[in-house]
Each structure stands twice: as structure tokens, then as C-alpha cells.
Amino acid sequence: MTADIFSLEQDDKPEHLVRERLLAAFRGNEDAVRLIYDIRAIAHTWDDLIDGDKVATPAEIHQAFTAATVGLNLNAFFRQHAALITPVLLTGILNWHAANDLEKDGREHCLDVAYAIRCAVGDVALLCAFVTGGMAHAQAHAAQLRMLMQQDRRDHYLNDFKASSANA
């Protein structure tokens, strides 16, 4: 498969296509897809609660906490591969903390690094493709998965950062 670069910038997120592409990358494994959706709910809500740039609704908070406390534990794919997935989640969380600290510095290079690492938890999707299909399969889907997991272009990220800094 040729890498089909599918950018999901800002509001350009047709969920049926995201799901379809995740299913293809994970060789039809519904539990792997559900894991990515649960991680996405957790990460987005956590970020919204910390940086305050978007108000998390009670429904989003409930969904994220349910996913974190129950969803992951009931997910057969996660349970089977927790020894592989957990360190990648931990690294993603540490990268997100580092990105927040780098943003406080505010220098251009710090913001470049923060932008590059703040969505590192998306690496779980690459790992899911590897677990479900092996190295060649994961490599064939890697670029597309990065585009699916990376939410903002650099210029959007920098504009949002500057706007939130001005309001702080």
C-alpha cells in the first residue's frame, strides 16, 4: 500500500473515514480502534482541563474518566498487549508534560520541539499497526497514521499558542 497522506487539520475530521483508515491499518481489529478512540478522549480532555483553551463539557470529562478507568481495562487488545502499549503511553504522557514546559519557555526552538512531541501518544497507533500486521504492514501505514494522529499544522499550533499566551 502506498502511503495515503490524509491530513485531519482542525475541523477536517470525517469520523467515518478516520475509523475506516484505522480499521485498515489495524487489519480490522475493532478493539485496537476502540483503544485509539479511548486514548484520544483521555488525551484531549486532559489537555483541555490543563491548558484551558477549550472548556471540556461534563460529557467529555465523564467519557475520558470512564475510558481511563474502565475502557482500557476492558479492552481485549490493550489487555493482551499492555506490556508493549503501556510504555508507549507513558512516553507520550511524559512528552506532553515536556511540551507544556517548553511552551512556558516560549522561545522559537522550544515551541518547535513542543509542537513535534505534544502528540507523541499517537505513537500507540503505529504500535497497533505493528502488532496487528507486522513491520512491513506498520511501515506501509505509518505516514498515514501520523497524519491521522497529528491534529494541527504547525502554523495552527503556533497561532493557538500565541492567542492563549496573549490571554494569560
Image: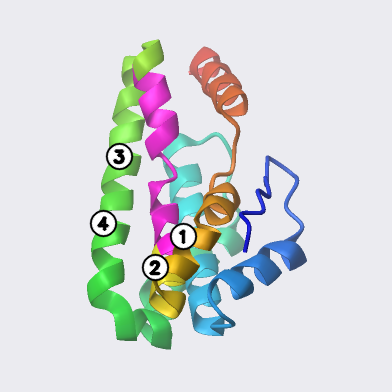
Instruction: Give the numbered dot on residue 139.
Output: 1
**Kind of residue at badge 3:** His
Residue 9 appears left or right of 47: right
Instruction: Give the numbered dot on residue 135.
Output: 2
Q: How far apart are marks 2 and 3 (CA)?
A: 29 Å
- Badge 4 marks a residue whose secondary structure is helix
**Kind of residue at badge 2:** Met
Q: Magenta: predominant secondary structure element? A: helix
Mark 1: few, some, or many residues within 10 Å (few <14, many ≥20)?
Answer: some
Mark 2: few, some, or many residues within 10 Å (few <14, many ≥20)?
Answer: some
- Badge 1 marks a residue whose secondary structure is helix
From the image, state whether disc 3 or disc 1 is nearer to you: 1
Magenta-span inclusion, residue 107: no
From the image, state whether disc 4 or disc 3 is nearer to you: 4
- Badge 3 marks a residue whose secondary structure is helix
Labelled pair 1, 2 in contact (Cβ < 8 Å): yes
Labelled pair 4, 2 in contact (Cβ < 8 Å): no
Magenta-span inclusion, residue 112: yes
Q: Position of residue 25 (x, y in %)?
A: 56, 69
Q: Which of 77 and 70 is in front in this view?
A: 77
Q: How far apart are marks 1 and 2 (CA)?
A: 6 Å
Labelled pair 2, 3 in contact (Cβ < 8 Å): no
Q: Where is residue 165 in the image (x, y as percent from the top left)?
A: 49, 17
- Badge 2 marks a residue whose secondary structure is helix
From the image, state whether disc 2 or disc 3 is nearer to you: 2
Q: How far apart are marks 4 and 3 (CA)?
A: 11 Å
Residue identified by numbered label 4: 90
Q: Image quadrant for the N terminus?
A: bottom right
